[in-house]
Amino acid sequence: MYIVISKNYREFVAGVFSSKDKSDKFIDRIPDNLGENVKTISIEMKYPFYITEDHNGFCFYSESEIIQKIDEYISEMDRRDEGWFYTNMYRVDNDFEPRQPGKDNMGLLKHYHVENETLRNIMKNGFNKLW
C-alpha cells in the first residue's frame, strides 16, 4: 500500500493506493500551492486495514493488530476519565482517492473518535459491528 501524507497546518492522509503508479498519478494532480509538503510511505498491508491518529501521529494496523490495540485501550478504561480520547480510528477498505487532491478529506473515511463509549460498544457488540 502507498499512503500519501500531506501537510497544511497538520499532517493528514491525502490518499491511499494499492499501487505506486496510482499514488504517483494522484500526487501529480495535487495543486502546486498544496503539494509542497507531500510524502509517500509504503506499508505492507492488505485491505481492509486501519489507521490511528493521535498526538503521536499516524499508525497503521491490520485487523488483528487493531483489535489488539483496542484491547489495550479497554484495559486502561478504569484509569481514564469518561471523556478520555484514545485515538481517531479509520478503516480503509479500498483505495482512497478524494476528488480534491491535497485537501484534508480524511473525514470521508469510515472512522470513530475512540472514547470509553466506543470501547463499551465494542465490548458489547464486537469490533466488526462498528463497520
Image: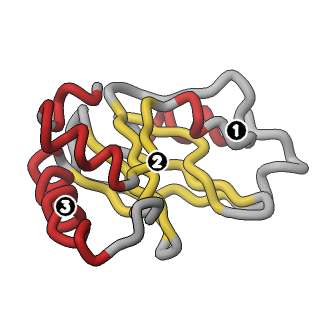
Residue 61 relative to residue 29: left or right: left
Q: Determine crowd level at label 3: few under 14, some 14-19, many 20+ residues with C-alpha closer than 10 A.
A: some
Q: Position of residue 104 (x, y in %)?
A: 69, 43
Q: Amino acid under label 3?
A: Ile
Which residue, given by chain and number where applicable, does mark 2 sit on? 113
User: Residues at badges 1 and 3 in contact (C-beta under 8 Å)?
Assistant: no
Residue visible at 65% across and 42% down? 27
Q: Residues within 10 Å of mark 2 (few under 14, many from 20)?
A: some
Determine the secondary structure under disc 2.
strand
Q: Which of the pair 5/66 is nearer the observer?
A: 66
The residue mark sitting in front, 1 or 3, is: 3
The N terminus - image quarter: top left
In the foreground, 102 or 75: 75
In the shown orientation, is residue 65 left or right of residue 7? Answer: left
The tag on residue 40 is none
Q: Please tell me whether mark 3 sits on a helix, a strand or a loop.
A: helix
**Which circle marks residue 28 in the picture?**
1
> Tag 1, which secondary structure?
helix
Horizontal side, residue 65 vs residue 54: left or right: left
Q: How far across and down, in percent of the image, does residue 45 sit?
A: 22, 46
The amino acid at mark 1 is Asp
Give the mark nearest the N terminus, 2 or 3.
Answer: 3
**Foreground: 19 or 106?**
106
Residue under the image location 86 percent in, 47 percent down: 32
Pointer 3 residue:
74
Vertical placement of 85 versus 29: above or below? below
Between marks 1 and 2 in the image, the one whose residue lies nearer the viewer: 2
Answer yes or no: do the residues labelled 1 and 2 have beta carbons within 8 Å? no
**How far is disc 2 from disc 3 in space, using C-alphas?**
14 Å
